[in-house]
Image (spheres, helix red, strand yellow):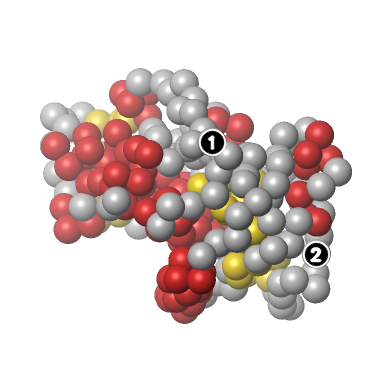
Amino acid sequence: MTLQEAIVARHSVRQYQEKPIEATVIDRLNEEIARCNKEGGLHIQLVLDEPNAFTGGMVKYGKFKGVRNYLAMVGPKGADEAIGYYGQHLVLLAQTLGLNSCWVGMSVGKQPDRYQVAAGEKMHCVVALGYGANQGVQHPMRPMEKFIKASMPLPDWFRRGMEAAVLAPTAVHQQRFEFELVDDHTVGWAKLDLGIVKYNFEVAAGKENFAWKKA
């Protein structure tokens, strides 16, 4: 499975099997986490066999069950876009490795002995990981055109990017984003859940076809 195929195949999953993640998968995830942390200046950590963060209210209100593994999305304060961008890369990689996942923005039970948060950093969110009891379902989406601002015909690479962007997970499925085709090779944006959406767009559009407009 490619990353682009993973964009289509992946859905949020909240119930998991009691099955440990295979060692080869753990090694691959940790290898990529290290690369993302170095490139993005982040401190993302893979937490394994730790069920306490997803208990109590997370079970009752979040409907989570059987979560024992997660990504602790730690990074500098103000690094929300980078957390979303690199986190989505890891989420899609996990899908290609046979895992399911769910971005979790609501508060989880803190387990500070299982991950590190250094001075100047914060836990932005977590991502549940594991072998799902199901594969999740696709939530209703608004038409792609609702998220586009353009005064020229849309090139094929832009359409591919937007088709992937609307599949990106966003907070409570609100999809509050807008991409602007500035010219035939430049894309602008409006912020919110931005890193996740931008990553999906890049995978499908091809980074070689455009440049992001500087904020």
Q: Nearer the viewer, residue 123 or 92?
A: 92
Question: Is residue 42 visible to us here?
Answer: yes
Residue reaching furthest to the front: 19
| Crowd band around label 1 with a 10 angstrom C-alpha radius: few (<14), some (14–19), many (20+) | some
Q: Amino acid at mark 1?
A: Asn
- Residue 4: x and y, percent? 29, 47
Q: Up-down: is 87 above or below 24? A: above
Q: Nearer the viewer, residue 200 or 112?
A: 112
Element type at marker 1?
Answer: loop
Q: Which residue corresponds to mark 2? A: 111
Closer to the observer: label 1 or label 2?
1
Which quadrant of the structure image shows residue 151?
A: top left
- Residue 17: x and y, percent? 62, 46
Residue at the spot 55% in from the left edge and 71% down from the top edge: 42
Residue at the spot 70% in from the left edge and 40% down from the top edge: 64
Element type at marker 2?
Answer: loop
Q: Nearer the viewer, residue 71 or 87?
A: 71
Residue reaching furthest to the right: 56
- Residue 102: x and y, percent? 57, 45
Residue at the spot 75% in from the left edge and 71% down from the top edge: 114
Alpha carbon separation for disc pair 1 and 2: 27 Å
Q: Amino acid at mark 2?
A: Gln
Q: Are marks 1 and 2 in contact (CB under 8 Å)?
A: no
Residue at the spot 33% in from the left edge and 26% down from the top edge: 144
In primary-sequence order, the first of circles 1 and 2 is 2
- 214 relative position to 154: left or right: right
Q: Nearer the viewer, residue 56 or 190?
A: 56
Q: Up-down: is 21 above or below 120? A: above
Question: Is residue 187 visible to us here?
Answer: no
Q: Which residue corresponds to mark 1? A: 134
